[in-house]
Amino acid sequence: MTNSPFTPGIAPARLDAEALAENFDDLHGPLDGHEALVAADRCYFCHDAPCITACPTAIDIPLFIRQIATGTPEAAAETIFDQNILGGMCARVCPTETLCEQACVREVAEGKPVEIGRLQRFATDTLMAKGVHPYARAAETGKRVAVVGAGPAGLACAHRLAMKGHDVDLFDARPKGGGLNEYGIAYYKATDGFAGAEVDWLLKIGGITFHAGQALGRELDLSRLQAEYDAVFLGMGLSGVNALRATGETREGVADAVDFIADLRQADNLQTLAVGRNVVVIGGGMTAIDAAVQSKLLGAESVTLAYRRGRDAMPASRYEQDLAASKGVRFVFNAMPVEVLGNGAAVALRCEYTRAEGKSLVGTGETFDIPADQVLKAIGQTLDGAPEALALDGGKIAVTGAGRTSVDGVWAGGDCASGGEDLTVTAVAEGRDAAEDIHSVLAG
Ligand code: SF4
């Protein structure tokens, strides 16, 4: 959990309810029917469309845009869901500016791509609003599969397995399914409980039983799962948090950015959320950006994002950096935290400037202090509690092909598995492909 509202300098309700509601409203709002037709009309329906190749789930983008253009958004949604059952969430959170929209020929030619993400949202929202689930299960196979982790990888895997007629037990350590969609993304990217509604809609396929509060290494044991099920898929993400290794890390006011974001996502009333007057976020990825922007939107006076390398090395895209800057987040590059200053509670973060020497980063010896009554750490997550039987690669579960681990009958995908970018859409692709592979093995 983040710090108590009574930590000095960290207070709830810095803004009134109206300002908070406006700040945390839907970032890109939905297209209406007319706007969708206008946006669809810009597509050239390219042969060998580069946007398809750029999509990790290989959605047939020109086909779904043509279906929108011809007035059949429900058919467009099915084209999307055939490849990506979480197409509704991906339409909201995908970094389209570095994927399909970057590859779009209209971006290359005119610097203005077809709005693929917003069109995808229009199609998927249209179908989901009808409450129908477009897929039916194949005849029951009698096979049972355990899926550990109900995030994007686990959900995609479970859905595809259920479609093939297998029975799935879907386990998650948290009370709700959805993984990072529910607990780990910026509030304004998926508003109105969309993450939960999407899970409910997905489970309508049938054949999937959700078990909350079940974590591997706690309530679940891999060898028992192997004995009880015909196959096991692991998609539990990364729940460990890297240490800052700076003096004073335990001072009041220092918290993990993932917990800060999870609290925000689960809050019924944004006015109950406490935020510092001066916030410093440490890190350079999406979690850092999401924590920094939301601190500002909650009413922090100054928010500084400190990243130890230069701007070009930042994992967060330039689009996300610009979004944060437009909300008033200040960036400090080549800054390595060395100490959280304060007497009990944090008052400042001392950083040392860095420079690259070959592939390594060294401190220059020059330090400076940033006022901070709240310090949020977003310095990466690690695999926690991986079963010893599984081979690891770079701190993640080693997989080959469609998610096969070193142990027969056990697959893995999403952030906990090696390879691929840590994106929602990549996790969906890995879960789906592992399910196809599991099915082919179970079908003999
Ligand atoms: Fe349409 Fe752009 Fe894809 Fe071509 S690259 S099919 S114009 S979205």
Image: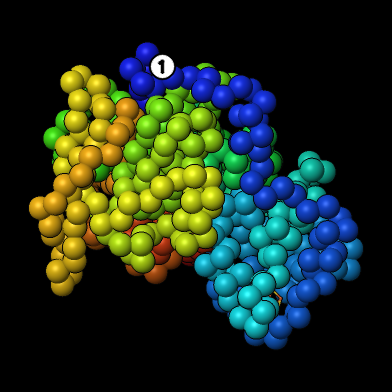
The outermost residue toward the bottom is: 47
Observer-nearest of 172 and 189 = 189
Residue at 19% across, 57% down: 354
Observer-nearest of 204 and 10 = 10
Q: Position of residue 158 (x, y in %)?
A: 54, 48
Observer-nearest of 84 and 209 = 84
Residue at 77% across, 62% down: 76
Observer-nearest of 177 and 314 = 314
Q: Quadrant of the N terminus?
A: top left
Q: Is residue 436 visible?
A: no
Give the structural element (helix, strand or loop) at label 1: loop
Q: Position of residue 120 (x, y in %)?
A: 71, 59
Instruction: Write down the residue under mark 1.
Output: 5
Q: Is residue 218 left or right of residue 97?
A: left
The image quadrant that residue 361 belongs to is bottom left
The outermost residue toward the top is: 6
